[in-house]
Image (cartoon, grey):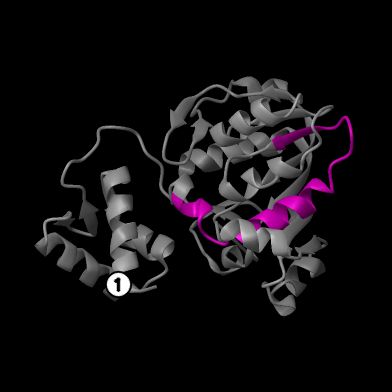
Amino acid sequence: MIEAERHRIIKKLVDEHSIISVSDLVDIVGASEATIRRDIGSMAERGELIRIRGGAQSVLPRHEAHLVGSPFKLSQELAAPEKRAIGRAAAKLIEPGQSIIISGGTTTYALVEFLPREGLDILTNSIPIITQLLGTSRNRVTVPGGTIYREQNIVLSPFEDDATNHYTARTLFAGCFGLNRFGVMETDPLIVQSQVRLLRRCEQLVIMADYHKLRQRSSIVVAGIERITVLVTDQQTPDEELEWLRSAGVRVIRAEVETSDMQLDSR
């Protein structure tokens, strides 16, 4: 990624989060810590942000709750063709009349386009998914209570007793920050709490993750590998990186990007 693009992304993240750490920027931008620190330094000299110990602060900080991780709009631009292919493949796992859960995220959002137009019961905490379902389908939609986090376009609650506890589903479709031998990983404790509650309400877990996710790491594990039923990923994920998942009993589906996916990405 060229310097100008890194600076654009860093500026957007700092303005949206008010304060962000160097380690978070390393994870999101995909550059080295030394590069990120140099970027922060040069941007601070130009007055685009304020350099603080361990990170950066917005010149005009917001007083609003935020989550650790990349904003929805920014994540949506990353690996868009692969996410659409993954969404199409994951939709084939759904049978008519099923109750399902779709957790918030840009990869799971790609699933909605390929869902049946009616006959499903769907629980989701994603604002874009709710909006899309209401506009394009007659499926029944249930929303858990909580606070709306605008950057990630998600509804989350720190409390145990919400609509989630009164819902049961065949399958939970979920994205993740990263995936390795320890399990499914996320970066924010509030997202982890929500995912754990959702996991209690489903029989099967389908993880939707493009090739980038198998190379990302976090310190917070949501669920062990033994909890995953299916991984839907894309063709760019090397086969040798999937063998340990297959050995653990996880069914692996590799979605193929079609021409229409690439055309959508170029608009």
Residue 232 appears left or right of 211: right
Left or right side of 235 for 163 = left
Toward the viewer: 113 or 186? 113
* In the depicted structure, whether residue 133 falls above or below residue 232: above
Question: Residue, x 26% and y 44% (percent of image)?
Answer: 18
Residue under the image location 57 percent in, 66 percent down: 212
Q: Which residues are magenta?
A: 74-101
Magenta run includes residue 95: yes
Point out residue 262 in the picture as x, y percentages from the top left corner. Answer: 64, 63
Circle 1: element type: helix
Location of mark 1 (residue): 3
Crowding near pointer 1: few (<14 within 10 Å), some, many (20+)?
few
Residue kind at label 1, given as amino acid type: Glu
Q: Let me know if residue 113 appears in the view.
A: yes
Q: Position of residue 59 (x, y in %)?
A: 15, 46
Q: Quadrant of the N terminus?
A: bottom left
In the displayed structure image, the side of residue 137 where residue 94 appears, left or right: right
The answer to whether 143 is drawn above or below residue 12 in the figure is above
> In the picture, which quadrant includes the C terminus?
bottom right
Q: Count how many numbered circles sit on residues in the image.
A: 1
> Residue, x 51% and y 25% (percent of image)?
159
